[in-house]
Image (spheres, rainbow, N blue to C red):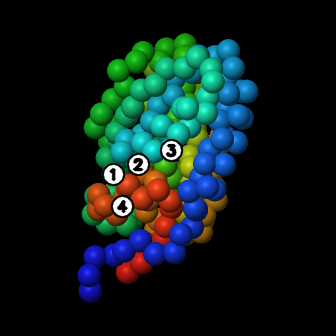
Amino acid sequence: MGLPQPGRVLVAEGELAARVAELGRAIARDYARANPVLVGVLHGAIPFFADLMRRLPIDLTVDFVRASSYGAGTTTSGAVRLVVDLTVDIADRDVLIVDDIVDTGLTLAALKRAFEARGPRSVRTCVLLDKGSRRLADVAIDYVGFSIPNVFVVGYGLDYDGLYRNLPHVAALDGV
Ligand code: IMP
Ligand code: MG
């Protein structure tokens, strides 16, 4: 048994680019005059965040958080911790959380709760991938790139034990 490897491509580079452009158009329309705070969830959101922000021809502010992650496994512990916090004051601001994937929803639910306690005008969520079948937390996802089946995926920011974030596409992980 070797290391699990990226296998079948689930979302190709071209599909990612096209969908990110569509999301950008919708978000730019909705936040045209809002000067939103775009919050990227490190590290998984990095490629999606970087591509999405360049599809938003509006005034915006960027910031980042890091939530405690899965570690080496492929299932959630349920505990979510903010290990890197915002540097921007989000009071009276429109916040859009940008993450790579929503699985149980525990991460986004906890982030949303934490941000809502700071007096923002609004907090909404945007994820590239949605594994709807595994939802445990009741959290609204306002913008979704793709709905995917319940398989562990890597690439375009998503990792397995820190690996494969640099793939330009999203692939299923084989051998888990
Ligand atoms: P949730 O709290 O269960 O919704 O999990 C969200 C986080 O778990 C994501 O931001 C990812 O970091 C990680 N995660 C969930 N599913 C996958 C996957 O299929 N591949 C890689 N990371 C994943
Ligand atoms: Mg993540």
Residue designated by label 2: 44
Q: What percent of the width, then of the height, locates residue 91?
A: 49, 14
Residue contact between numbered discs 3 and 4, judged by CB atoms under 8 Å: no
Mark 2 CB lies closer than 8 A to ligand 2: yes
User: Real-space Cα distance between discs 2 and 4?
Assistant: 11 Å
Query: What secondary structure is marked by label 4?
Result: loop
Seen in the image, is 131 located left or right of residue 45? right
Q: Amino acid at mark 4?
A: Tyr
Q: Position of residue 82 (x, y in %)?
A: 33, 37
Q: Quadrant of the C terminus?
A: bottom left
- Distance, label 1 to label 2, CA atoms, is 10 Å
Amino acid under disc 1: Ser
Tally of marks: 4
Q: CA distance from mark 1 to mark 3?
A: 18 Å
Q: CA distance from mark 4 to mark 1?
A: 16 Å
Q: Nearer the viewer, residue 60 or 96?
A: 60
The mark closer to the camera, 2 or 3, is 3
Q: Is residue 141 above or below residue 175?
A: above
